[in-house]
Amino acid sequence: MNLPALYQIADIYLQDLEKLNDLDLDEQTVADTLESIQGDMQEKCTNVAAFIRNTESLADQIKQAEAAMAARRKALETRAESIRKYLLDNMQRTGISKIESPYFKIAIAKNPPSVVVDDEDTLKFAHPEFVKTVTTESLDKSAIKEAIKAGQIVEGAHLVQAERVTIK
């Protein structure tokens, strides 16, 4: 059986409810009509919920595949870095600083200088000009929520309670 779209069934359901309110019908006719239109609505909602479940399942499978691929990428990056260090160590050990091949050139190069801080407290005290203060602000939404729930008026904020569909 091919049902109309959910929004179409919902429209029909609401129109039928309006008609039932306008008509002077006996209770059994009203009950039968409601049961009939509710059945279509419930069947369509069940089908839509099944589609949601399948879509969520597919999204979860993709998330798991992404995590597996990220772990594999990280392992390959770690392996490449380890082999790079192995190559550097052995070239340094043998005094070879440059190798040319038809495919690529291998050379030992100096990295840019980097700062090593030996004693952070001494450095901060002796050279305050090198201390950078970083301040970040963020709203404590949990505290705002609790204050509003407790009856406090918080200008610039209010609580909203939305609805969602749960599928269990």
Image (cartoon, rainbow, N blue to C red):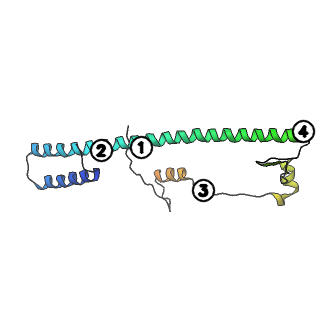
- How dense is the environment of label 3, judged by Cα within 10 Å: few (below 14), some, or many (20 and up)? few
Marker disc for residue 138: 3
Give the residue pinned by disc 4.
Answer: 93
Point 50% across, 50% down: residue: 146
- Dot 2 and dot 4 residues touching (CB under 8 Å): no
Residue 47's quadrant in the figure? top left
Question: What is the CA distance from the residue labelled 4 to the residue labelled 1?
Answer: 56 Å
Point 50% across, 51% down: residue: 145
Point 60% across, 56% down: residue: 138
**Looking at the picture, how far across and down is residue 63, in whole percent?**
52, 42
Q: Secondary structure at mark 4?
A: helix
Give the residue pinned by disc 2.
Answer: 45
Give the residue pinned by disc 1.
Answer: 55
Q: Between tags 3 and 2, which lies in front?
A: 2
Q: Between tags 4 and 1, which lies in front?
A: 4
- How dense is the environment of label 2, judged by Cα within 10 Å: few (below 14), some, or many (20 and up)? some
Question: What is the CA distance from the residue labelled 3 to the residue labelled 1?
Answer: 35 Å
